[in-house]
Amino acid sequence: MGFKNCNINIFSFFIFLTLPLTLALQVGFYGKTCPKAETIVQQVVQQRFAADNSVTPALLRMQFHDCFVRGCDASILIDSNSTNQAEKAAGPNGSVREFALIDQIKSKLEQSCPQTVSCADIIALATRDAVALSGGLRYNVPTGRRDGLVSRASDVNVPSPSFTVSQAQRAFSLKGLILNDMVALLGAHTVGVSHCSLFQNRLSNFQGTGAPDTTMDPSLLTKLKGICGSSSNTNPTAFLDQNTSFAFDNRYYNDIKSGKGILQIDQELALDPLSAKLVTNMAASTNAQFGQSFAKAIVKMGSIQVLEGSNGEIRTDCRVFNQKKTLDESSCDC
């Protein structure tokens, strides 16, 4: 769960009513109805990861953006049509990717168990498997989500990389997530990249001062100026974790403690008294301990406002609702 255009995007504030986290999801939900479901997901993700290991931050970002808008209901997967601009069309989702991977998984699941496994569960399971392939903990994912019937670009507004810790904490708390959850989830920035446009102001004119952000390590500042000043790319990218860029470990916390946070929220996380102690603890922990903390937080995030039972539907195609909606239907909250 990352930030705009950084494969994991996490930020741009707006207020939601906080709804309770579900207690009905369960590990092994498809044990009888589709016993090979999780194996099928894992196999397809493994094939994709072998071709492109940046699939991990992409899926983390997809899950974050899905869960923070209308809950974890796969509404981010819906394509726009002539009567509705779906979430996918919103600016913050412009660089969310790996939709084709979800399609591939869904196709194989439909062949094995028609109209059984939800697209929302596919996102959660695929993200878990990608994290494990990057060296993270293969945590248990409670399943049983159903797919949403509404997807509107106008609903999309996710927390911004220029947030203060207090602003970020409020955005997460409105989703039922506490500060510990937020610090652990931001650890997903141990993989992935950010576009220069999201931190350029820190390199030259931070908060209107006409000077770089003084909290940034000087050697990193020089490095990022070189990357972002490249004339061959109008909006280059930089790794969020400067050392183990493709490994799902706790290095991110050590980086931000050393002034090597790329995004403003990353660096402030290590400096703000609200979160500094938590960052220090994460930096001093083992990778296994970080993995456990992250797993607990992402499972909690994956339970936000889910649809269950007879609510929603099980899509046969993750990109479209089972029954095409009229303009009025697709824009209502029914």
Image: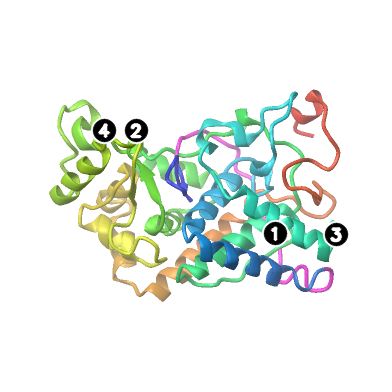
For label 1, the residue is: 105
- Determine which residue is flagged by label 3: 114
Instruction: Please report the residue visible at 47 percent of the width from the left and 70 percent of the height from the top.
Output: 136
Q: Please, what is the dominant secondary structure of the magenta stretch? A: loop
Q: How much space separates mark 1 and mark 4, taking CA atoms?
A: 40 Å
* Residue that badge 4 annotates: 201
In primary-sequence order, the first of circles 3 and 2 is 3
- For the residues labelled 1 and 2, the Cα–Cα distance comes to 34 Å
The residue type indicated by label 1 comes to Ile
Dot 3: few (<14), some (14–19), or many (≥20) neighbours within 10 Å? some
Numbered range of the magenta stretch: 11-33
Tell me if residue 19 is in the magenta stretch: yes
Q: Secondary structure at mark 1?
A: helix
Precedes in sequence: disc 3 or disc 1: 1
Quarter of the image where one finds residue 15: top right
Q: Are marks 1 and 4 in contact (CB under 8 Å)?
A: no
- Circle 2 residue: 234
